[in-house]
Image (cartoon, rainbow, N blue to C red):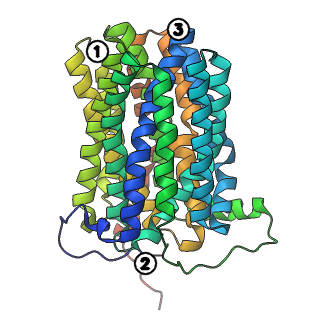
Amino acid sequence: MNPPSHDKRSFNNPFLPLKHSNFRYYWIGMCISLIGTWMQNVAQPWLAYTLTKSAFLLGLVGAIQFMPVLLFSLFAGVLVDKLSKKKILFFTQSASLVVTLILAILDFSGHIQFWHILVLAAALGLVNTFDMPARQSFVIQLVGKDDLMNAIALNSAMFNMSRIVGPAIAGLVIGYYGVGMCFLANSISFAAVVISLFFIHPLPMAARRLAANQHILTDIRDGLRYIYRRRILFDATLLMTIIGTFAMNNNVLIPVFSEVVLKHGSMGMGILFSCSGIGALIGAMLVAITSKSGPNKLVIYAVPTIIGIFLILNSFTINFLLAGFYIAVTGIFFNLFSATINSTMQLNTENEFRGRVMSVYTLVFSGSTPIGNLYAGLADDYIGARFGFAACGIIVVILLIPMYLYKLRSRNRAGAEACKPERPSSG
């Protein structure tokens, strides 16, 4: 399947998808919800670290939250291909509201314990297992294929704008009112998405329906085979696995780095999370304004190395401003990369496989987080808080080397085949 053709302009209005009323409702609802989500993303690790004073147990919270994504994403992708994505989102957003409300009540009551955080993180992770591939594959039904890459980039911009606002608010709220208020705000924010869904009428997408009597493992196998047989999808998945696992473990690294190395506490932590969000927002907008030219292969294959280098650099500073700069630059390149990978996978996927392909994207983007969080937590505990970023950057670079060598060998082999003179026919 070929991606849609693009016109000759290299730049375009990044807010073009907002002309679609469906996307406007969805985008506004998600803007509100994601600010609450990022408030919780700051408050939850801070609470876990306050209760335990252990980077490993902090990493365990992230691992538990994303473990359901690792275990069940492929099954979720089949469900997303079979059921209405809008109905799935109604359920997942409502369930998220309930889970975060319980966490807020426990904190306000003064009975919160570490195991409560683990259980509720696992529950939220299970909900997100179905929510994320549904959201990813729902976008095309809001804007159509022509504006899809732009919409993905604008979604990413919205996500990362909330990464700037949410952590900054969370740092203040935690300092003045405590972490429970962040959990309550997040619970209320999920209602914005639920309300927006009432006004959305998704575009119908022509696709062959999955057979109701076919075994779910067969559907999963077909989806994985579909990715494996398309080189661009396979490469994108492999690279996203490396970056998604080891490059962005900020929820483990930043709280410890702020507290132990930079000595800036919760306020500094919130600012560093916002720096990451600012960088990611810039990266998303770069994708949005260049979306007419389609996904850039240079971004797909070169940017992962740059991300690894900046992670390593961050470990060699104790200056707060310089650390914020390195984190922001890493955010720029990470979001430039992830938005390009997301667009590449969707534009090269047929509608009937979209849910399963995006479930694999969710698996390698978020489902690999337990491995990365545990790795980052162990690195902080045993190597030292200062070198956690370096440990992540070094393994990224090491894992990229064999893939680059394979690509180079394949290119050289293809070049050699093309240069071979044709054997004259016997006559």
* Badge 1 vs badge 2, beta-carbon distance below 8 Å: no
Three-letter amino acid code at the position of disc 2 = Arg
**Label 1 vs 2, first from the N-terminus:** 1
Q: CA distance from mark 1 to mark 2?
A: 58 Å
187 or 370: which is nearer to us? 187
Front position among marks 3 and 2: 3
Marked residue nearer the N-terminal end (1 or 3): 3
Residue at image coords 26%, 38%? 279
The picture places residue 427, in percent across and down from the top left corner, at 47, 92
Question: What amino acid is labelled 1 in the image?
Answer: Phe
Counting from the top left corner in percent of width and height, residue 200 is at: 47, 68
Decide if residue 11 is in sight here.
Answer: yes
Give the residue number, with chain letter if any, for mark 3.
53
Identify the disc placed on residue 179: none
The relative height of residue 381 versus residue 157 in the rendered view (above or below) is above
Q: Secondary structure at mark 2?
A: loop
Mark 2 or mark 3, which is nearer the start of the sequence? 3
What's under tag 3, amino acid-wise?
Lys
SS for callout 3: loop
Q: Position of residue 199 (x, y in %)?
A: 46, 67
Residue bearing mark 1:
316
Say if 353 sits above or below 277 in the image: below
The reply to whether residue 233 is in sight is: no
Assess disc 3: are there few (<14), some (14-19) or many (≥20) residues with their C-alpha within 10 Å of its C-alpha.
few
How many angstroms separate mark 1 from mark 3 (CA)?
23 Å
Residue 297: which quarter of the image? bottom left
Residue closest to the far front: 109
Circle 1: is it few (<14), some (14-19), or many (20+) Cα within 10 Å?
some
**Between residues 420 and 290, which one lies in front from this camera angle?**
290
* Disc marking residue 423: 2
Placement of 285 over or under 250, stated as above or below: below
